[in-house]
Amino acid sequence: MWTISFILTLYFLQAHVLGYIKILEPYLPPDKNVLLMIADDLGIGDLGCYGNKKAKTPNLDKLAKHGIRFTRMYSVPSDAGSMNAIMSGREPRRFGLVKGKTGRTSFSSPAQTGGIHEKQYTLARAGNRYRVKTLYNGLWNLGFSGNKIPTQIGFRSFFGTLLPHSVSCVNQDRYTDSDMFKALMYEYYPIFISISLVIVISRYFRLLNRCLFILSIIAVILSISALRIHCWTSVYNPSSCIFMENNVIQEQPYREDRMMLRMTDQAVRFMKYRANHIQPFLYIVSFLQPGFPSATSFKFRNRTALGPHGDSVHEMDWSVGKILKALKDSNLQNDTIVIFVSNNSPTKTHPVSGEPLDDEHTGQTCIYGKDGKIDLRGEKGSNFEGGLRVPAIIHYPGKTRKESVTHAVTSVMDVYATIYDIWEMKKTEEETKIDGKSLMPLIKNPKLTPSNVIHEQLYHYCDLGKVGAVTLGDLKIHFRNSTLKDCAGPLLSQPLVYNISGDPRETNPLPIKDYIHLLYHVEASVKKYQSSVGLNVVKHSQFDEIPMPFNFPCDEILFCSKTYDIQENFNTLLY
């Protein structure tokens, strides 16, 4: 009798426990970690695994050999916009992170208050809801005010820089806010001199009384002062090169020859720490490399025959290798999905002079096929393939097949949805409205066809106007007359249709008469999409916001400089 009662009790307890587990299942932490590595302006032709035989990228090549490599991963024509797309899985235009009336395609000053919305759904907030430890290491570029930095939008820690590496952060050929002010004064000095002469002559002939004369002189002085303040708040101020740890500025301006070593050391330390803990993690490493001007640590300069850009790519690959080795040494490699992607394609134009950059200072926007090397048209900021295609690699232990390659159309927005699928999370109603698609079908079967199996249509926006181009599998339609540097332009009288699989350089438009029906269908789809996701509601670009001097992040009021006072020794890391 007691035995029967005991068995029945166990049966009912088991039923209740299983019931509670089923109820709580959507809220249980996932059993997979995610390591997301983001390169800055890495060209699709910069890596050995994409066909570049001169590249020194053995670690990324090895990652691609054991994972899946994407040949048609598309970015967006904006640094901040692309980072937002990765973090939220949504069109940057939804949040005004596109080119505005001023022509800027990214933030021009750390004194601007724009960036990612503090209540916006991001990978960090999703991870926290499911007890995933989320950490951010490296380049942020999604806001500079107190409520925009990573620790305020959900990440447990932040170790990195607020802005991309710029010409104001380098040791050689530095361009500062003082240089900018001198250049603007040289450009506008005829206007200031003319106005001053008119004021003096008017006073001499008594056309102005003393009061108006003094007020006019003050107005000229204030105009010059406002111009100087505008230059001081720009990204060309060396004080905008800020290295932070959590909410605290550690160095201002930072030393460019130390940043990659610091980031790598920080990531390696975390992997060693994580080996003794069981909480799943999302660890993001956002490299400063290899975007122009290419940042390189003292140990990696002149290590390749490809110039500063090649050295920077080589150092980034070294960092990837160190982080993956730490992952393996901590016995985490079988439980960690590794995602590597570039946020943008390279720029080929100097940001100050506007002159073309030498090959040794910029990445390669090219692909390697059966017919050899094919140079893609365009650079970062354009709607051409050279301005949108970026390298991407995913390694999912136990699921990705070795040396897999997919030619399906994908987007950096898909990173967000893919990580959700990896974690098998239950999405909220708001999170179901994302624009990205999960890449899990391709991870399981990279040979899926046709090329629009993930995105039936992929829209390319760069400003608040009409869509610039649409990718439909092997076809691509240009609706605007964009240049090789700028995706914005007037609407074409007749759209241009290209076959990207056969003509990746986009030089031979197809006969428009053969695609009239398709064009009607696409234009209707674009209007429906814009209306459904509210793109027509956004009327202003965050990049147009006027910087306010008192918003400039400084270590102390009126003192925008700080020296990193921690003794650094990277011998263990380097040798």
Image (cartoon, rainbow, N blue to C red):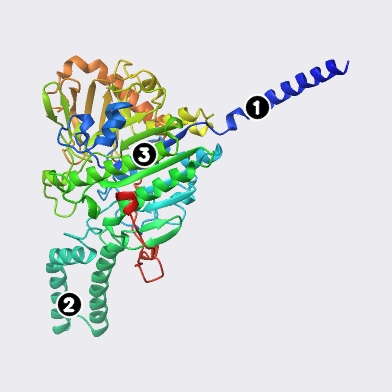
Q: Secondary structure at mark 3?
A: helix
Q: Nearer the viewer, mark 1 or mark 3?
A: 3
Label 3 sits on what residue type? Lys
Instruction: Of the two numbered discs 1 and 2 on the same chain, state the one appearing first in sequence.
Output: 1
Give coordinates of residue 121: x percent, y percent. 48, 39
Q: What numbered label is drawn on residue 386? A: none
Per the image, the residue denoted by label 1 is: 21
| Residue 135 versus residue 57 in the image, above or below | below
| Residue 92 found in image quarter | top left
Q: Is residue 282 left or right of residue 369?
A: right
Give the amino acid type for the residue marked by disc 2 in the picture. Answer: Ile
Circle 2 sits on which residue? 199
Residue 552 at least partly seen: no
- What residue do we see at 13% from left, 76% from top? 197
- Can you give x and y, in whole percent of width and height, for residue 473 in the image? 27, 20
Residue at image location 15% in from the left, 20% down from the top: 510
Q: CA distance from mark 1 to mark 3?
A: 36 Å
Residue in the image at 23% along x and 64% along y: 177
Tell me which label, 3 or 2, sits earlier in the chain. Answer: 2
Query: Which corner quadrant holds the N terminus?
Result: top right
In this picture, is 164 found above or below 433?
A: below
Q: Position of residue 269 (x, y in %)?
A: 42, 48
Splitting the image into 4 quarters, where does residue 389 fall?
Answer: top left
Q: Residues within 10 Å of mark 2 (few under 14, many from 20)?
A: some
Residue that mark 3 sits on: 325
Q: Are marks 1 and 3 in contact (CB under 8 Å)?
A: no
Q: Position of residue 567 (x, y in %)?
A: 37, 63
Dot 3 surroundings within 10 Å: few (below 14), some, or many (20 or more)? some
